[in-house]
Image: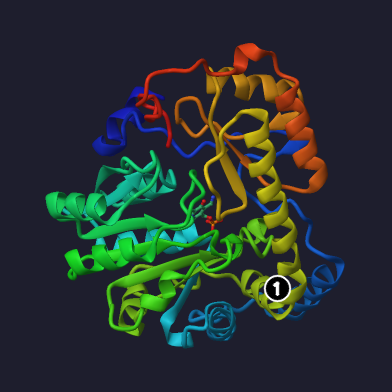
Amino acid sequence: MRPEIAGLLREDLRGRQPYGAPQLDVPVRLNTNENSYAVPEDVVAAIVEEVRAVAAHLNRYPDREFTTLREALAAYLRAQTGVAVEADQVWAGNGSNEVLLHLVQAFGGVGRTALGFTPAYSMHPIITRTTGTTWVDGLRGTPTGVFDLDSDLAVAQVRRHRPQIIFLCSPNNPTGTALDLDVVRAVLQQAPESLVVVDEAYAEFARPGTPSAMTLLAGHPLLVVTRTMSKAFALAGARVGYLAADPDLVDALRLVRMPYHLSDPTQAVALAAIRHDASLLATVEAVKRQRDDLVDKLGALGFPPVPSDANFVLFGGLADERTTWQALLERGVLVRDVGIRHHLRVTAGTPDESEAFLLALGDLPDSHRQLPAPAGNEQAREGAPA
Ligand code: PMP
């Protein structure tokens, strides 16, 4: 970086790394947890029709309050979770990343602290820091499981750091397991004056009987549940994420969003997709079957998988995850190194993609396998993105 640019850059951003999941053109891309199934033809046709209808009016700004989209998202959430959500409880942005940014812009800032439990979604700290908010890397891990977060561990860290914002992620990325709602309840009780954000980007893939934190919205005005159309809806390219919360909290987000942040084409694409949700969400069951199959087969191959409620699986048993990541890439399979020693994360794709991944993994020499090691080896790598 030119010294005059580095010199003027905000001090707290100097030396930081941007989000950087590799975007490589390889035959099997299983590294960013997209939905591997293409948008079905009937939905493509509906999207084209909706976008066509707004095209002639692009000389005008879009509906700043995206009212129709909010109503449609509220109806979807009511149907999906059984929780009585109204349009004034819904907010949306260009991906749930932007929705998270709005939350941190409104409730974080210099002198305030956000706490997350690592390893979790690597963008939580990056988004937090863009607003000058202090990020605290809390810990997961209990005697019952290295990646579990239990109520006592969460509450102890909340008590210690007294954060204004607390990030929970369920199902958790990159580990895959959904959070017990008792943990959310315990955190809400311990921190009644903090914003508690439950990131449910992968909620639709959860195993049967996994309740959403949306069921806790009533009576908790500082609880926010974020969702996205990038995963189950197979619309990562459209950039639409949303949240449900108290109407007053949603109203506060209007103070920080840029005017007209959701373009007319974006609103049109999202609406067409929600109107065809049955067709789009039909892939969810297929992805879940692939996920469960991956869990079984990884276990059988001797690479212990972490139980998954998402569209990806974290697996261990690797001597050196960086070497295995590279070896898989050379075999045309891109997975994700999430910075956890001896582990890699793989997205559950189509049956052909899963097969290609399992074949490539099974084909690797034994030198890729971790030798039995003393306990306590599963920490994040020094300086690696979690
Ligand atoms: N939350 C989690 C846990 C994620 O894994 C992702 C994407 N990988 C997001 C939020 C953001 O997704 P988007 O901005 O596409 O909605």
Query: Label 1's element?
Result: helix
Q: Quadrant of the C terminus?
A: top left
What's the residue at 71%, 80% (across, down)? 275
- Left or right of 220? Residue 41 is right
Q: Nearer the viewer, residue 89 or 77?
A: 77
What's the residue at 48%, 81% (across, down)? 65
* Residue 109 drawn above or below residue 366: below
* Residue 264 drawn above or below residue 203: below
Residue 295 x/y as whole percent? 63, 43
Is any atom of residue 30 visible in this view? Answer: yes
Residue 248 x/y as whole percent? 31, 82
Is any atom of residue 191 visible in this view? Answer: no
What's the residue at 28%, 83% (across, down)? 219
- Quadrant hosting residue 48: bottom right
* Residue 34 drawn above or below residue 96: above
What's the residue at 41%, 58% (across, down)? 179
Label 1 crowd bin: few (<14), some (14–19), many (20+), radius 10 Å: many
Report how many numbered discs are placed on residues in the image. 1
Q: Which residue is mark 1?
A: 273
* Residue 382 drawn above or below residue 89: above
Q: Nearer the viewer, residue 27 or 310?
A: 310
Residue 69 x/y as whole percent? 58, 80
Amino acid residing under circle 1: Ala
Q: Quadrant of the N terminus?
A: top left
